[in-house]
Image (cartoon, rainbow, N blue to C red):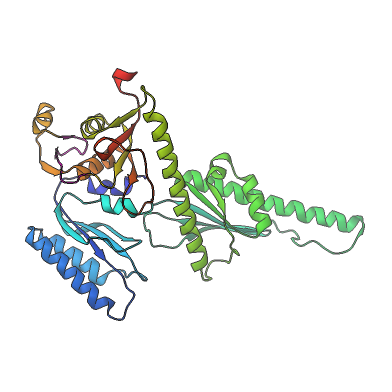
């Protein structure tokens, strides 16, 4: 999982208010129930000494913001008078919580599908439409960004025989193929521009298959076909939105399983670019050596780690940071320190198990491991 969407929470190290609550909106008294749940969380934060500005910002977001459709959870993080993180979760939290201090992000990451940019294409023999599913808003539907009507030639084969009719059929066939090739080129450009890791092909079946065959190598690697009529923009997109959500979830699961397979391979090699255990992983984060941070959902979260202002400056002992010339700003739970450092250094995240991921990786020391960008010097 790309942690870029959490970068705003890595610096500065000012305390945050983090809330997990049941945001279900599936009964007549849902509004009243939501107010009661929020009041419990606010009372808890007040008891922890939370900043009044953060409390008011959270209250405005919870009571005056978006509403879920049916059962849902919600996680919000406030710093000062801003709410830089506000996301619905697939299910209400098993244990609603409210914490003041370092952002409490692990429960969210264990059940939240990875935000994934998707280029969505609806294609038929007359052209196509390209839509973009933006991960910055997990609740937004795919938005049209480009439409292509194709060449102005006949697009329907005629009945009858003879050379004239056969020539017309060849013209129709060539026009169709030319139209689809043009759509494929536009899709390839969108994939490069957006960094998309999912290309969803909808619309007429023959055109979908031809489009798939004409995509460039990068686009084809991420392409999946879905059974969808390819209704134009402005129509009811609920069916398409649901299909894209399912495709994104499946793609995210495939990527996560591939990471776990890679972990097994690297960990089995004595010279592998791999670290496990809290202390070695902290050292790798300080060196900005971590490519992917891996955490077990059952990690002992009571352990504390010292942090300094730069997000990657983390250590079990205060003296380690002072020896680096840092002024430690305090201690935070181990998972918060690890995730803050990973997000700040551009590392990815992978759950090993726990939560609702349904994924299980190899047991690792302390429930903490990392795939490294290069092998440790002693192993090279």
| Above/below status of 364 relative to 38 | above
Q: Is residue 150 visible?
A: no
Residue at x 49%, y 58% (from the top left corner): 244
| Above/below status of 292 relative to 54 | above
The percent coordinates of residue 226 (x first, y second) are: 57, 57
The percent coordinates of residue 331 (x first, y second) are: 11, 42
Q: Quadrant of residue 218?
A: top right
- In this rendering, position of residue 166 left or right of residue 378: right
Stretch of the chain drawn in magenta? 300-315
Q: Nearer the viewer, residue 187 or 148?
A: 187
User: Magenta segment: does it hold 87?
Assistant: no
Q: Quadrant of residue 126?
A: bottom right
Q: Nearer the viewer, residue 181 or 223?
A: 223
Question: Dominant secondary structure of the magenta stretch?
Answer: loop
The percent coordinates of residue 137 (x first, y second) are: 37, 58
- In this rendering, position of residue 341 left or right of residue 174: left
Residue at x 38%, y 47% (from the top left corner): 359
User: Magenta segment: does it hold 303?
Assistant: yes
Q: Nearer the viewer, residue 252 or 329?
A: 252
């Amino acid at each position: 999982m790309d942690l870029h969407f959490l970068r705003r929470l890595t610096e500065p190290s000012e305390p945050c208010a983090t809330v997990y609550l049941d945001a279900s909106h599936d009964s007549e008294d849902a509004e009243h129930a939501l107010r009661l749940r929020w009041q419990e969380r606010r009372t808890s934060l007040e008891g922890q000494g939370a900043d009044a500005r953060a409390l008011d910002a959270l209250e405005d977001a919870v009571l005056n913001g978006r509403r879920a459709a049916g059962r849902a959870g919600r996680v919000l993080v406030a710093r000062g008078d801003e709410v830089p993180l506000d996301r619905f979760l697939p299910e209400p939290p098993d244990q609603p919580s409210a914490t003041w201090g370092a952002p409490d992000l692990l429960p969210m990451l264990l059940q939240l599908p990875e935000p994934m940019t998707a280029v969505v294409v609806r294609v038929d023999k007359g052209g196509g439409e390209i839509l973009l599913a933006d991960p910055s808003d997990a609740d937004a539907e795919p938005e049209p960004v480009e439409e292509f009507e194709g060449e102005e030639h006949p697009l329907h084969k005629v009945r009858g025989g003879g050379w004239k009719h056969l020539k017309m059929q060849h013209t129709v066939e060539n026009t169709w193929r030319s139209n689809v090739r043009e759509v494929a080129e536009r899709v390839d450009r969108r994939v490069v521009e957006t960094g998309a890791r999912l290309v969803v092909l909808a619309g007429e079946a023959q055109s979908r298959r031809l489009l798939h065959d004409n995509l460039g190598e990068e686009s084809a690697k991420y392409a999946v076909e879905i059974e969808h009529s390819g209704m134009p923009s402005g129509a009811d997109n609920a069916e398409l939105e649901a299909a894209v959500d399912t495709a994104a979830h499946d793609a995210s699961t495939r990527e996560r399983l591939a990471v776990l397979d890679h972990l097994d391979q690297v960990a089995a090699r004595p010279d592998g670019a791999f670290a496990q255990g809290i202390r070695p992983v902290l050292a790798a984060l300080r060196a900005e050596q971590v490519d992917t941070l891996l955490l077990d959902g059952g990690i002992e979260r009571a352990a504390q780690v010292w942090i300094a202002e730069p997000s990657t400056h983390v250590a079990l002992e205060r003296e380690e940071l002072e020896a680096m010339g840092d002024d430690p700003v305090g201690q935070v739970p181990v998972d918060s320190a690890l995730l803050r450092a990973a997000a700040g250094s551009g590392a990815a995240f992978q759950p090993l198990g726990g939560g609702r991921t349904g994924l299980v990786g190899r047991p690792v020391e302390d429930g903490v491991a990392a795939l490294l960008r290069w092998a440790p010097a002693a192993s090279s």
